[in-house]
Amino acid sequence: MDDTCVTCAEVLNWVAYGACRHKDVYCTCVARSRFISHDRCCSICKTPSNVVFVTKDLGEYTKRIGDFSVLPPDVEEGRVGNYWYHEGTQSFFDDSDHYKMIKAMCELSCSVCDGIDKFRRKEKFKDIEELKGNLFHKHKLFIIQFYGESELYTHMSTEHHTCRMCLRQDAGQYEYYKNFRDFENHFHTYHFLCEDEECLAKKFVVFLSEHELKVNYPTDENMHTQRSYV
């Protein structure tokens, strides 16, 4: 039975590994992680690797680099002795054709610009940040970042707002709002928002029922515990 990549589940034809020597990830997955996300860590053990080695997967006969320190430091793009070096992913290859394939995959161009003028020579970008800048400033577009389940939860919990009132009513109901305006609109629609200037400044003081709002308005220090500060 063929080995499969632990990231994409595709058959392992080519692998990329660092000094930790975990050869369980397809080289394309490693290249995407290093080039797009700037993640230099092994997908298996999370050990950071300044460089990785890309080679044909041959099972127990896969070519091994015993000591990564023998790889030349401070190298530039292209042929380096018996290997080929790709600067964008900090990878050494022992096969020129596969090096060219990964290099072509990592060449960044704007599909919007190319679609507008098909006869114009495609503009290349040196890194993902430069491409993002072109998309935003020229076309008012954004690159969407994708997350795994745990990464998505961390992102949503730290970068967006969720309603504690809704969670009190249904512990499994997680709805997120991109900004305070959407958040405030939600409170106006589904809950009872205190419109007192002091309470609005706290963003926000909200009640589950109109009765609670009336009981606690005007504010009374003894009743703050009945409010939900969100």
Image: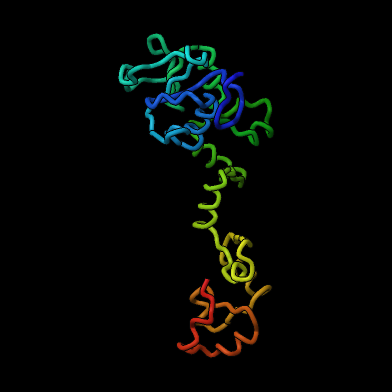
The vertical placement of 183 against 222, above or below, is above
| Above or below: residue 227 compared with residue 56 | below
Q: Is residue 87 visible?
A: no
Q: Residue furthest front?
A: 1
Quarter of the image for residue 146 reads top right
The residue located at (50%, 33%) in the rendering is 33
- Residue under the point 52% across and 27% down: 25
Q: Nearer the viewer, residue 111 or 11?
A: 11
Query: Quadrant where the N terminus lies?
Result: top right
Q: Nearer the viewer, residue 192 or 105?
A: 192
**With 198 as the anchor, is 80 left or right in this view?**
left
Q: What kind of colouring is applied to the model shown?
A: rainbow
The percent coordinates of residue 6 (x first, y second) are 55, 30
Q: Judge whether 203 appears above or below 220 on screen.
A: above
Residue 68 image position (x, y, % from top left): 34, 20
Is 17 on the left-hand or right-hand side of 143?
left
Q: Nearer the viewer, residue 208 or 99?
A: 208
Q: Is residue 129 above or below residue 108?
A: below
| Residue 143 place in picture, x, y as percent | 58, 42
Q: Position of residue 197 (x, y in %)?
A: 52, 82
Q: In the visual, does 149 lie left or right of 112?
A: left
Circle count: 0
Specify the quadrant of the image occupied by residue 184: bottom right
Examine the rendering and report whether any part of residue 108 can be seen: yes
Residue at point 44%, 13% (across, down): 63
Give the residue displayed 58% in from the left and 90% down from the top: 215
